[in-house]
């Protein structure tokens, strides 16, 4: 196992290198450059100012030169300076990470706590009223646009009932835990809906497969109680594919949610990404996208390792 | 569909006019009910919560691309523009004019402007006094090659800044410039920034030091900027009234409106389509601030095809007459805006009401096109010499209102045999194409300061002339107006320029943009301004009533 993990880690290097090249080219290929921030404010701009701006940021250089410069800096641990704010990219991402991790982990845990029992119960009571309702609700959850659902919840819980704040991470001047939790409720709930819907479906179908397997019949034949059969044997085995899917979703813990963070004015990485994209802030975009890519690759490895650990039949040697 | 929406929009318009927002007066005045409901005398204390849109890039007035409001709470300049589209002195005691003797012509033909400054003004940290040194330091920074100040070219005619004494700065202008009174909207502290690379200096750009009514406290990335009362404010102990101002960044427009509805903010910027949802909120007043900004229909002659089609004035005038601005204003914008016929805002002293107008007149337009040789072809589209009158409109994907009014124009034009295709690009991509001149037609906005100079837009070599049009007579009027210090003479020149601009039919103004703002009924002394410096010019006297 150790050798396998080492090999996979080494393979990540050329992979990430390739990804960085690809992302860099795609970002540069998008029409319009970072000077758009000047042009979009609709004031009369001195064209020489735009030239000075391009020169300072090295945008007057050919794309390959820009890439090599970026890569050289990254290899020495420097992700560059944001075009818009002039601050180090690493610092900007780091200051957004806590908010994103907080929001995503709460919604992740909440989703897991709901989705797994939901899927199990649906499978056990297949074709019952509960199963049909859960199935319908899941499809609704998957299909529902986040921005719409978020605004509806705001209207209900903030505007009508006045229970929860519409947006933000805390009330300015009130740093209490209760206040922060209140701010978490809506965005975390909105984000967890899709996970709940998706994971419960996986859990249900996975458990349905397992329940019909021979070893479950054996367990029942041994005279084990149904409860034990289900928890000790069936659910544990059915969790294997579900856990690997959840592990893949873990990458999102750090890269954040673009739409939900924007709507709820949540100061996370996802919103930073949107800002960077509209401003064509190349270094910041590269920083966020490379972090996201690394995490996807990394959690793929985690999923594979978890797979082997949960299912002894799978061996990586 | 648009007609059906007419009634509620009329109601809004009526509210605006009854409340003293009529087009002839300052349309930005808050409704009278606002003044009545706020406490009669200013109340001290309280936190002003502002629901702001996109997060700012930095807090340096000169290097930020979209700051103004936040800056104006902390940083002051020699001047600011007020709710009447005038420049008023702030850190300057007086704005130099020929009349008050502070503008003098030297024997060598250069101008000397003497700026007397306020005395006893301390920078926020109370360690240094604001002096003429800071003014000249700011000038030096702006004109330095890498300053990246968007209007650096306006400062270039200043060849020298001299500290006459601690409280007097003298500037030498090589060529006369009528817009001298709108410059130096912020002053930088020399003691803090001398020797620093200001564009990159976070020590100032993320925690500025000014002389303004509020002092910087904190900026939480992605969340808010908070400023607190300056207890030593130079205008007197009573100012500012509020203890704190918090600018919360709420990028989503719907969330911002929800934050208003749930009482989380005292002030928020909205968009015109939200006006109908925001006009009857019990604790807020809706104010439509007419901006010094207008939407304009342009044609580019920088491509051979464009030059061929739009080189003919009859075609341009015909296209103008095919744009039903009334339907756009009443239908798409729900009556929240006014039709524009010229570039100067109606609130400006330079507004010329008597320019040639292009009302919607399909019959006249068709005749113009027929006479110009553009005959309707078999497919219903006009053509001439093998060229189809099929035009591509450049549109930003972020422009939600643009998508709606282009539908109106598309229909108007189609009925007259002019085909319009819409080319939607994301904002940055659109800007690039637009600046290159490689487009056919487009509608977008410009934002003017209190001064109405449009030389950069419509003079032959104007740095922001994206269409390629050039009329020597117009050019002369524009350039002369920029150099004319006599207000009356300047007005004549600018009136002439506006007439020529309309006569030449290079650009059709569509409507003046409005900026809908909702403010708490408790907020007193708010005096909306539509200039590029925004409405926070008098934030020192804002207060939150009981």
Image (tube, rainbow, N blue to C red):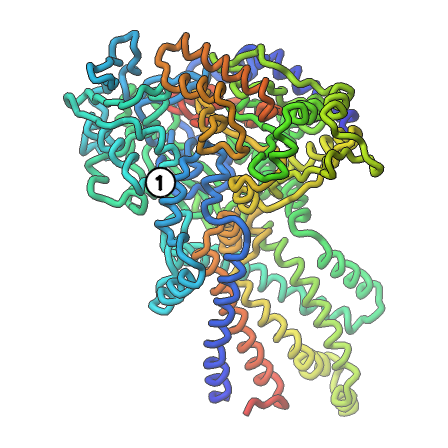
| Mark 1 neighbour class, 10 Å CA radius: few under 14, some 14 to 19, many 20 or more | many
Q: Is residue B242 left or right of residue A197?
A: left
Q: Is residue B391 left or right of residue B170?
A: right
Q: Quadrant of residue B132?
A: top left
Q: Residue at the front extreme?
A: B385
Decide if residue B158 is in sight here.
yes
Return the x and y of residue B275 as percentages of the image width and height: 64, 28
Return the x and y of residue A139 as percentages of the image width and height: 76, 60
Q: Nearer the viewer, residue B364 or B516?
A: B364
Return the x and y of residue A131 as percentages of the image width and height: 80, 66
* For residue A251, above or below residue B86: below
* For residue A156, above or below residue A24: above
* Point 42% across, 22% down: residue: B542
* For residue B209, above or below residue B340: below
Return the x and y of residue A171 as percentages of the image width and height: 47, 42
* Point 49% across, 51% down: residue: A280
Decide if residue A181 is in sight here.
no
Q: Is residue B116 left or right of residue B340?
A: left
Badge 1 element: loop
Q: Nearer the viewer, residue B122 or B189?
A: B189
* Point 36% across, 49% down: residue: A55
| Residue that mark 1 sits on | B148
Q: Quadrant of the N terminus of chain B?
A: top right
Q: Quadrant of residue B483?
A: top left
Q: Nearer the viewer, residue A81 or B271?
A: A81
* Point 84% across, 63% down: residue: A129
């Amino acid at each position: 196992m150790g050798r396998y993990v080492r090999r996979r880690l080494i393979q990540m290097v050329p992979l990430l290198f390739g990804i960085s090249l690809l992302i860099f080219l795609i970002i540069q290929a998008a029409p319009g450059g970072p000077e758009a921030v000047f042009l979009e404010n609709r004031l009369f701009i001195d064209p020489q100012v735009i030239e000075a701006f391009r020169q300072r940021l090295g945008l007057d250089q050919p794309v390959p030169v820009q890439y090599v410069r970026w890569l050289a800096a990254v290899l020495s641990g420097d992700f560059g300076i944001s075009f818009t704010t002039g601050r180090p990219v690493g610092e900007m991402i780091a200051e957004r990470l806590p908010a994103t991790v907080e929001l995503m982990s709460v919604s992740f845990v909440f989703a897991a706590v709901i989705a797994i029992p939901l899927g199990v119960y649906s499978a056990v009571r297949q074709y019952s009223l509960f199963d049909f309702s859960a199935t319908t609700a899941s499809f609704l959850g998957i299909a529902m646009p986040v921005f719409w659902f978020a605004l509806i919840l705001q209207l209900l819980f903030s505007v009508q009932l006045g229970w929860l704040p519409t947006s933000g991470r805390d009330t300015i001047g009130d740093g209490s835990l209760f206040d922060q939790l209140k701010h978490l409720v809506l965005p975390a709930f909105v984000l967890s809906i899709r996970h709940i819907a998706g994971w419960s479906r996986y859990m249900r179908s996975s458990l349905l497969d397992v329940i019909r397997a021979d070893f479950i019949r054996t367990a029942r034949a041994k005279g084990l109680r149904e409860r034990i059969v289900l928890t000790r044997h069936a659910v544990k085995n059915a969790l294997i594919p579900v856990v690997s899917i959840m592990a893949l979703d873990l990458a999102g813990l750090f890269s954040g949610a673009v739409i939900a963070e924007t709507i709820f004015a949540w100061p996370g990485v996802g919103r930073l990404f949107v800002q960077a994209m509209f401003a064509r802030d190349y270094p910041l975009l590269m920083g966020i996208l490379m972090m996201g890519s690394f995490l996807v690759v990394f959690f793929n490895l985690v999923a594979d390792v978890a797979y082997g650990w949960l299912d002894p039949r799978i061996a990586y040697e | 569909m648009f007609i059906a929406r007419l009634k509620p929009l009329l109601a809004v318009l009526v509210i605006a006019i009854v409340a003293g927002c009529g087009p002839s007066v300052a349309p930005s005045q808050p409704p009278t009910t606002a003044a009545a409901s706020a406490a009669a005398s200013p109340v001290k204390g309280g936190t002003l919560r502002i629901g702001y849109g996109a997060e700012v890039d930095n807090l340096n007035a000169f290097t930020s691309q979209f700051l103004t409001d936040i800056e104006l709470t902390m940083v002051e300049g020699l001047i600011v523009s007020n709710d009447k589209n005038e420049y008023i002195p702030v850190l300057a005691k007086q704005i130099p004019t020929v009349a008050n003797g502070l503008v003098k012509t030297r024997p060598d033909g250069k101008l000397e402007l003497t700026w007397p400054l306020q005395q006893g003004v301390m920078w926020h940290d109370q360690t240094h006094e604001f002096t003429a040194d800071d003014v000249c330091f700011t000038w030096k920074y702006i004109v330095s090659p890498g300053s990246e100040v968007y209007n650096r070219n306006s400062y270039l005619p200043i060849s020298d800044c001299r500290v006459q004494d601690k409280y007097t700065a003298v500037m030498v202008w090589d060529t006369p410039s009528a817009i001298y009174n709108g410059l130096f909207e912020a002053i930088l502290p020399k003691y803090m920034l001398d020797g620093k690379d200001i564009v990159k200096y976070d020590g100032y750009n993320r925690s500025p030091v000014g002389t303004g009514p509020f002092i910087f406290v904190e900026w939480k990335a992605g969340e808010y900027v908070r400023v607190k009362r300056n207890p030593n404010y130079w205008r007197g102990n009573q100012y500012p009234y509020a203890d704190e101002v918090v600018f919360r960044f709420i990028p989503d427009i719907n969330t911002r409106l929800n934050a208003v509805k749930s009482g989380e903010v005292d002030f928020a910027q909205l968009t015109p389509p939200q006006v109908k949802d925001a006009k009857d909120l019990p604790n807020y007043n809706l104010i439509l601030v007419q901006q010094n900004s207008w939407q304009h229909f342009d044609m580019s002659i920088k491509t051979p095809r464009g030059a061929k089609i739009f080189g003919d004035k009859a075609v341009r005038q015909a296209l103008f007459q095919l744009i039903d601005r009334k339907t756009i204003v009443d239908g798409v914008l729900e009556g929240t805006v006014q039709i524009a016929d010229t570039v100067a805002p109606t609130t400006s002293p330079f507004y010329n009401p008597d320019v040639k107008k292009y009302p919607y007149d399909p019959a006249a337009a068709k005749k113009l096109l027929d006479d110009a040789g553009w005959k309707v072809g078999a497919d219903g589209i006009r053509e001439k010499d093998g060229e189809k009158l099929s035009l591509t409109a450049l549109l930003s994907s972020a422009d939600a209102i643009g998508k709606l009014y282009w539908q109106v124009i598309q229909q108007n034009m189609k009925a007259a045999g002019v085909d319009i295709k819409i080319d939607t690009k994301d904002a940055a991509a659109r800007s690039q194409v637009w600046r290159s001149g490689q487009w056919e037609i487009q509608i977008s906005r410009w934002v003017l300061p209190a001064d109405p100079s449009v030389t950069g837009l419509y003079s032959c070599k104007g740095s922001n002339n994206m269409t390629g049009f050039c009329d020597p007579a117009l050019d002369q009027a524009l350039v002369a107006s920029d150099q004319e210090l006599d207000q009356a003479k300047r007005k004549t020149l600018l009136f002439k320029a506006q007439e020529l601009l309309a006569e030449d039919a290079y650009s059709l103004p569509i409507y003046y943009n409005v900026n809908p703002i909702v403010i708490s009924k408790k907020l007193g002394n708010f005096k909306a301004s539509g200039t590029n410096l925004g409405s926070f010019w008098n934030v020192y006297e804002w207060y939150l009533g009981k």
